[in-house]
Image (spheres, rainbow, N blue to C red):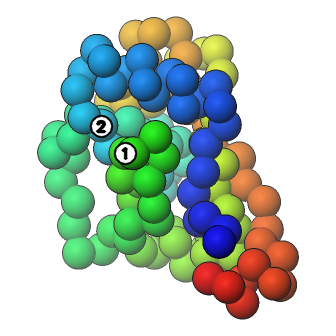
Amino acid sequence: MVKRVTATEEAIQFIEFLKVKHGPLMFHQSGGCCDGSSPMCYSENEFIVGDSDTLLGHIADCPFYISSAQYEYWKHTQLIIDVVQGRGGMFSLEGPEGKRFLTRSRVFTKEEQNNL
């Protein structure tokens, strides 16, 4: 079964590092504003998930949410979370580590869309 959100091996290893440092984590795909359109990493329960957020799935056993409005734009794509060198979102936990999470994507095949 195809997943709506997944992560590279490098991102998973970095998430595991952050979990040791900060405890349980969660992600929210930012929809713009201050931090652009970045996947934001928070300590679990530090970000209030609202009725307008959609749970896409889990990466490294961490829930990954996106705003329902943004989901409508991206529902035909798989989000692939990666990690790269550089400054992340100002509220995201990876910022002090000199790395940032990055969303890559690919369009689902017709067969994958039918299986969602």
Amino acid type of the residue that numbered disc 2 sits on in the rendered structure: Leu
Q: Which residue is mark 2?
A: 25
Using the image, tell me which numbered label, if any, was put on residue 82. none
Residue that appears at 30% across and 37% down: 25
SS for dot 1: strand
Residue that appears at 45% across and 10% down: 97
Nearest the viewer among 52 and 34 is 52
Residue 110 in the image: x percent, y percent?
Answer: 83, 84
Is residue 17 among what the camera can see?
A: yes
Neighbours of disc 2 within 10 Å: few (<14), some (14-19), many (20+): many
Residue 22 in the image: x percent, y percent?
Answer: 25, 21
Neighbours of disc 1 within 10 Å: few (<14), some (14-19), many (20+): some
Report which quarter residue 20 is drawn in.
top left
Q: Is residue 4 left or right of residue 58?
A: right
Question: In the displayed image of the protein, which residue is found farthest to the front?
Answer: 1
Relative to 40, residue 2 above or below: below
Which mark sits nearer the N-terminus, 1 or 2? 2
Q: Is residue 9 left or right of residue 90?
A: right
Residue that appears at 55% across and 17% down: 99
Amino acid type of the residue that numbered disc 1 sits on in the rendered structure: Cys
Residue 93 in the image: x percent, y percent?
Answer: 35, 24
Q: Quadrant of the N terminus?
A: bottom right
Q: Which residue is mark 1?
A: 62
SS for dot 2: strand
Q: CA distance from mark 1 to mark 2?
A: 6 Å
Relative to 102, residue 90 above or below: above
Q: Are marks 1 and 2 in contact (CB under 8 Å)?
A: yes
